[in-house]
Amino acid sequence: MEACLRIDFIGNEGCDMIHNGLEVNVGLLIIRLVVGLTFMGHGTQKLFGWFGGAGPQNTGKWLESLGIQSRGMFFAVAAGLFELVGGLLFAAGFMTLIGSTLIVIVMIDAIIAVHGPNGYWMDRGGFEYNLVLIAVVIGVALVGPGQFTYPFSI
């Protein structure tokens, strides 16, 4: 069967994921880079106060205001590390299962601690977006990171 080297929106015969190697790999790379780099940015906000972030002390105080008692700074640093390391591994496509797991843990925590009580929809502060991110990282972990990963294999 001939490989399909075009984007096909109507599902023509022969243009499936198995026969679209380049498109699948580029698509996985885009997903990994956008999601992974975004999580890395969030992690550096918590750990270092970069990109307008609050840093570990203020993030810790905010977490304590949510009821995490006196361990707010510990959990701020832990969340920041999970986001930074998880995002780096996910973006690189290296140890993707571990990176995805770190991201899922942070998102489940965000749902439980912050967004869950607000319901599902994001416009009310709900957990809709957290669940979408969980689905994306689990999906990539299940299908694999694609060909364009670290160590780079082309």
Image (cartoon, helix red, strand yellow):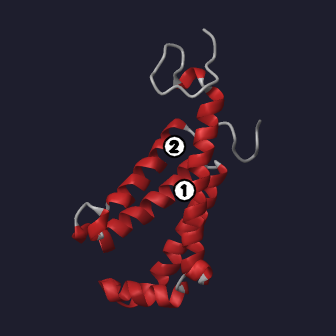
Q: Residue at x 63, y 16 (%)?
A: 3
Which residue is disc 2 drawn over?
140
Q: Secondary structure at mark 1?
A: helix
* Mark closest to the chain's N terminus, 2 or 1: 1
Residue at 63% from the left image edge and 44% from the top image edge: 29
- The C terminus lies in which quarter of the figure? top right
Residue type (three-letter) at the residue carrying disc 2: Val
Image x and y of residue 10, in percent: 45, 23
Residue 23 placement, left or right of 111: right
Most foreground residue, 76 or 16: 16
Q: Position of residue 103 (x, y in %)?
A: 48, 60
Whether residue 109 is visible here, answered yes or no, is: yes
Q: How many marks?
A: 2
Between circles 2 and 1, the one closer to the viewer is 1
Q: Is residue 71 visible?
A: no
Q: Quadrant of residue 145?
A: top right
Circle 2 Cα neighbour tier, 10 Å, few/some/many (<14 / 14–19 / ≥20): some
Disc 1: CA contacts within 10 A as few (<14), some (14-19) or many (>=20): some
- Residue 50, how many percent across, how many down? 62, 80
Q: Tell me what residue is drawn at x 52 percent, y 85 percent.
A: 54
Q: Alpha carbon of mark 2 to alpha carbon of mark 1: how far? A: 11 Å
Label 2 secondary element: helix
Residue farthest along the top direction in this orientation: 1
Quadrant into which the N terminus falls: top right
Disc 1 marks a residue whose amino acid type is: Val
The residue where tag 1 is placed is 35
Circles 2 and 1 in contact, beta carbons < 8 Å: no
Tell which of 69 and 40 is nearer to you.
40
